[in-house]
Image (cartoon, helix red, strand yellow):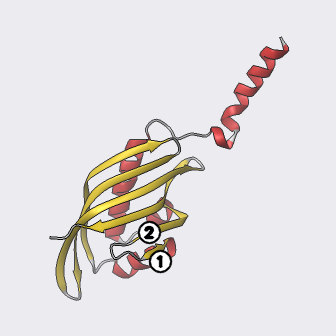
């Protein structure tokens, strides 16, 4: 009887333990939605939406190899808002779930205006997400241009 009570007690407590908190099975679709929201927020210069998507410790590895913190990335988006980004699309994405961690690999296309000249570029990206405090946040992002 005591053993049964102990087992029931432990089973009831497991969901309350931080290590027992796991990403839900719908993680892939949620991550794809977050990736699309990221593109739309960056296109609109929506810093508030991006702030919610990125973990405070986020590191962004830019196309030129430079490292940006979350604050630096958000600052760059603010400076580019309304004048630089015309559209940003990520049509091909693949999600790999590893428990509370996920990796999204995809391709992006970008069109914008820089110094009054239209330009386009495309590339590949790798974003690493962690299921933290009940939601997915991006902790590392990297983009690599595809050269013509």
Pointer 2: what residue? 60
**Secondary structure of the residue carrying numbered label 1:** helix
Relative to 49, 13 lies left or right = right
Proximity of marks 2 and 1: CB atoms separated by less than 8 Å: yes
**Secondary structure of the residue carrying numbered label 2:** strand
Q: Give how far across and how far down residue 62 sits, in percent.
A: 37, 72
* Label annotation for residue 47: none
Name which residue lies at 44% across and 43% down: 97
Dot 2 surroundings within 10 Å: few (below 14), some, or many (20 or more)? many
Q: Give how far across and how far down residue 80 sits, in percent.
A: 34, 79
How many marks the image carries: the answer is 2
In this orientation, which residue lies closer to the viewer: 96 or 90? 96
Dot 1 surroundings within 10 Å: few (below 14), some, or many (20 or more)? few
Q: Give how far across and how far down residue 125 sits, in percent.
A: 33, 60
In this orientation, which residue lies closer to the viewer: 46 or 125? 125
Q: Which of the 4 image quadrants contains residue 73? A: bottom left
Could you tell me which quadrant the C terminus lies in? bottom left
Name which residue lies at 18% across and 77% down: 119
Residue that sits furthest to the left in the current view? 148
Residue 70 against residue 39 in the figure, above or below = below
Sequence-first disc among 2 and 1? 2
Pointer 1: what residue? 72
Q: Which of the 4 image quadrants contains residue 87? A: bottom left
Residue 21 against residue 66 in the figure, above or below = above
Q: Give how far across and how far down residue 127 sits, in percent.
A: 40, 57
Relative to 11, 102 lies left or right = left
Q: CA distance from mark 2 to mark 1?
A: 9 Å
Residue that sits furthest to the right in the current view? 2
Residue 27 against residue 38 in the figure, above or below = above
Residue that sits furthest to the bottom in the current view? 115
Name which residue lies at 53% across and 45% down: 100
């Amino acid at each position: 009887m005591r053993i049964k009570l102990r087992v029931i007690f432990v089973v009831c407590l497991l969901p309350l333990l931080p290590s027992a908190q796991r990403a839900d099975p719908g993680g892939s679709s949620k991550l794809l939605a977050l990736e699309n929201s990221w593109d739309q927020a960056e296109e609109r210069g929506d810093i508030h939406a991006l702030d919610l998507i990125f973990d405070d410790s986020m590191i962004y590895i830019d196309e030129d190899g430079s490292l940006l913190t979350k604050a630096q990335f958000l600052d760059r988006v603010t400076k580019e808002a309304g004048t630089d980004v015309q559209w940003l699309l990520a049509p091909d994405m693949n999600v790999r779930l590893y428990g509370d961690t996920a990796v999204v690999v995809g391709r992006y296309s970008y069109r914008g205006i820089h110094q009054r000249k239209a330009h386009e570029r495309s590339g590949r990206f790798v974003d690493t997400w962690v299921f933290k405090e009940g939601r997915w946040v991006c902790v590392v992002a990297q983009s690599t241009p595809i050269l013509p």
